[in-house]
Amino acid sequence: MLYAVISDVHANLQALQSVLRFVRRKPIGAWLVLGDLVGYGANPNEVVRLIQRLRRKYVVRGNHDRVAAGLDTPELFNEIAAEAVLWTRKTLLPALRGYLRHLPAGPVPVNTTMVITHGAPIDEDMYILSDYDALLNFERTSARIVWFGHTHLPIIYIYTTDGQLTRVPIPPVRKIRIRLDPRYRYLINPGSVGQPRDRCPWLSFCLFRDTDWTVTFYRLPYDIYGAQRRIRRVGLPDFLAHRLMIGI
């Protein structure tokens, strides 16, 4: 089966539309959506509707989804993120707020091999940013592949059969395919669709084929100017528009 793996769309309609156009002729068997559908961007209703319409999907909530749905407060967010998520909460249609409210916390099993989560399998709000963070999660989980988001940085952590940990950062190139070893275990972040933070403004996502255990990372251009115009038009902080162009 071919899986499309996306994370951290953050209400960036233009970026999500680019992903959907790119894969429309590919035989996607299921979508893995790793949370933070909303927050930061200016089109939360449109993005949530598009996610709802995906034919076969596994979706977990992110921290921005949780706050936008009214399940949590933004007290741990920085000032700009808090302003954006509270605007999102007011802007979301009630039915779509309800959809976010009922999204499960990760980890959620996809099959006997894979689980999905937003931050980390041991804590949905945890950032996996170091070898130590990865090792801690490998020690407390048993899935062969854990798909995670939250950091907005594409990366693979590998845990071998002899207990060795390897980190594989993914360079910001248009396409890179990596064959996984079914004997090993993996933590894989597809990067962010809506707000990349690795100094490359192009959106990031993955396709995974379970028949040969290959994961392909893609970076695609999209209508960044359109996303910026929309952010400014609705009165969200200008920094949220500016950062899209420089990938931070």
Image (cartoon, grey):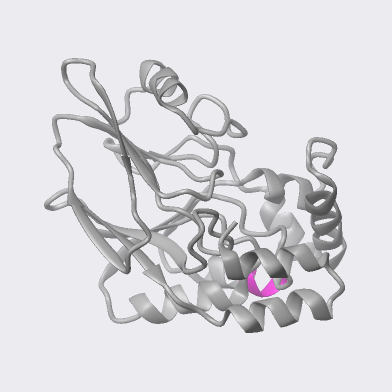
Image vertical order of residue 119 relative to residue 26, above or below = above
How far across and how far down the image is residue 124, in percent? 58, 33
Whether the magenta-drawn stretch holds residue 140 is answered as no
Q: Name the residue rendered at 61%, 75% in the picture.
A: 13
Q: Closer to the camera, 45 or 135?
A: 135
Does residue 43 appear to the left or right of 83 in the view shown?
Answer: left
The quadrant in which residue 73 appears is top right
Q: Closer to the camera, 167 or 119?
A: 167
The quadrant in which residue 57 appears is bottom left
Q: Closer to the camera, 223 or 92?
A: 223
Image vertical order of residue 205 relative to residue 213, above or below = below
Q: Which residues are magenta?
A: 44-48
The quadrant in which residue 208 appears is bottom left
Q: Is residue 222 visible?
A: yes
Q: Closer to the camera, 248 or 23?
A: 248
Q: Name the residue rendered at 48%, 30% in the picture.
A: 121
Q: Main secondary structure of the magenta part?
A: helix
How far across and how far down the image is residue 142, in percent? 32, 23
